[in-house]
Image (spheres, rainbow, N blue to C red):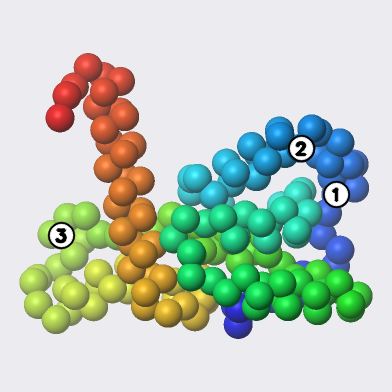
């Protein structure tokens, strides 16, 4: 939770937010669910309320060990104060697609430096996030599973089997 920042101002676009909130609950839930199923830009749009982004953050598949009581306590701080937490930024950073090196040319010679390059590639440090190593590893595994799934779908759609 140390990565959670205050949003600069109330961060929604009123007309869009009103239209979004007037959608049936089922459709809003589908839209919010889609937010954590793929990669996305790091740029915040502030089109959807921070409470929806908080829900998205809590639904991230590889962040299952977050203490929901801690999240609720943070949320209460914002409720009792004149500010909002920037859940959108945190969710986007955690969900950011990581592009690890794939070829020997990108990785360099095998050895300690090679391992360091791989660890840095998977690190959240480039997003200025301080996360436990377990989260980084779960994210790495999750990203690999997504990539394999996409390759299988693409192969199946082109008549390949494997």
Mark 3 or 1, closer to the camera:
1
Q: How many marks?
A: 3
**Residue 145 x %, y %:** 31, 48
**Residue annotated with mark 3:** 105
Q: Is residue 143 left or right of residue 8?
A: left
Residue 147, quarter of the rendered image: top left
**Residue annotated with mark 2:** 25
Is residue 19 among what the camera can see?
A: no
Numbered disc 1: secondary structure? loop
Mark 2 or 1, closer to the camera:
2
**Residue annotated with mark 1:** 13
**Residue 37 x %, y %:** 50, 45
Mark closer to the chain start, 2 or 1: 1
Which circle marks residue 28 in the picture? none
**Residue at 81% over, 39% down:** 20
Numbered disc 3: secondary structure? helix
CA neighbours of label 1 inside 10 A, class few (<14), some (14 to 19), many (20+) = few
Q: Is residue 27 left or right of residue 43?
A: right
Numbered disc 2: secondary structure? helix
Is residue 3 among what the camera can see?
A: yes
State the CA–CA distance, disc 3 to disc 2.
49 Å
**Residue 141 x %, y %:** 31, 59
State the CA–CA distance, disc 2 to disc 1.
19 Å
**Residue at 30% over, 20% down:** 157
Residue 117, quarter of the rendered image: bottom left
Mark closer to the chain start, 3 or 1: 1
**Residue 160 x %, y %:** 18, 22
Q: Residue furthest left?
A: 110
């Amino acid at each position: 939770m140390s990565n959670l920042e205050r949003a600069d101002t109330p961060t929604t676009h009123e007309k869009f937010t009103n239209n979004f909130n007037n959608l049936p609950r089922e459709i809003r839930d589908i839209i919010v669910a889609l937010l954590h199923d793929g990669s996305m830009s790091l740029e915040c749009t502030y089109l959807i309320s921070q409470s929806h982004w908080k829900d998205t953050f809590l639904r991230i598949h590889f962040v299952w060990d977050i203490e929901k009581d801690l999240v609720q306590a943070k949320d209460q701080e914002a409720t009792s104060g004149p500010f909002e937490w920037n859940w959108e930024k945190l969710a986007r950073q955690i969900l950011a697609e990581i592009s690890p090196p794939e070829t020997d040319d990108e990785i360099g010679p095998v050895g300690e430096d090679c391992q360091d390059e791989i660890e840095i590639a998977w690190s959240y440090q480039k997003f200025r996030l301080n996360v436990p190593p377990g989260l980084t590893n779960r994210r790495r595994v999750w990203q690999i599973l997504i990539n394999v799934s996409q390759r299988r779908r693409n192969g199946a759609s082109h008549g390949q089997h494997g």
